[in-house]
Amino acid sequence: MNTQPSALIAEDEPLLAQTLQRELQALWPALQVVATAGDGLSAVQLVLQHRPDVLFFDIRMPGQSGLEAAVELADAWPSEHAFPLLVFVTAYDQYAIAAFDAQAVDYVLKPVRADRLAKTVMRLQNRLQQRAAQNATDLDPVLNQLRSLLHAQTPAAPAAAPLQLLQASVGNQLRMVPVDEVLYLEAADKYVRVFTLDGGEVLLRTPLKELMQRLDAHVFWQIHRGSVVRASAIESVTRDELGKLNLCLKGKSERLAVSRLYAHQFKAM
């Protein structure tokens, strides 16, 4: 059995990725960097393939941020394996750093400093030893960290009344859709698909994150990073053979996946 610790670096600046790898090799010769990625989507695929012990994720990457990639990984991660230790690589940002500190998530500032990285390496080594001794695979602490970090990364919504109408373009027309008629919303590339109680569907250009800031959180529940449903329309929630939750909405035959990040809303399951 190979006990050599392994890591993956996801960083869209090649020179910084090389510098980080070189400094890690000097500080932690036993650490094997199994792969590097230049964007969040590639990082997710490589992590699932190699299952490294440690992830160095740039917080800002093209296509998908390091935090978004970590959320996707947590949802896809096999529950019988311990989730990798997370280290975010970031330019100085007092809000991001405050959030990392609050959730005990380590970070490395750009440009990489050997003395600061040495402290990170020491923490990682200690945590890997503790985890090996405890044989811990519980994902709940990781999910709690990611929920809090996502909340901290979302800008505070300006004081405004909750949305009453959604403005949707339908051909050459602008259709006004009452929020009371919305069944669920689903992010799709640059649009948000809005499904209404009467079976209709329209497209919005407003990002789902912005819409969520003005929707009543007691009425609309987020169940996935790209899905929001009317809570009162949920008919049933089932758990499949892999332990994943899926829900059915009243009058609808299709099932909607509930990600691990939002499964805590259905504690009875």
Image (tube, rainbow, N blue to C red):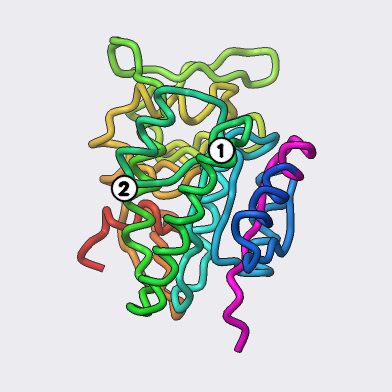
Does residue 85 appear anywhere in the picture? yes
Depth check: give the residue in front, 59 or 246. Answer: 59
Q: Which residue is mark 2?
A: 233
- Could you tell me the amino acid type at mark 2? Ala
The span shown in magenta is: 1-18
**Total number of numbered discs in the rendering:** 2
Question: Measured from the top left, where is residue 38 in percent x and y?
Answer: 75, 44
Depth check: give the residue in front, 227 or 3. Answer: 3
Image vertical order of residue 265 relative to residue 204, above or below: below
- Could you tell me the amino acid type at mark 1? Ala
**Mark carried by residue 187:** 1
Q: Residue at x 28, y 56 (%)?
A: 264
Question: Measured from the top left, where is residue 78 in percent x and y?
Answer: 51, 73
Disc 1 residue crowd, few under 14, some 14–19, many 20+, Cα 10 Å: many
- Of the numbered discs 1 and 2, the one sitting upstream in the chain is 1
Disc 2 residue crowd, few under 14, some 14–19, many 20+, Cα 10 Å: some
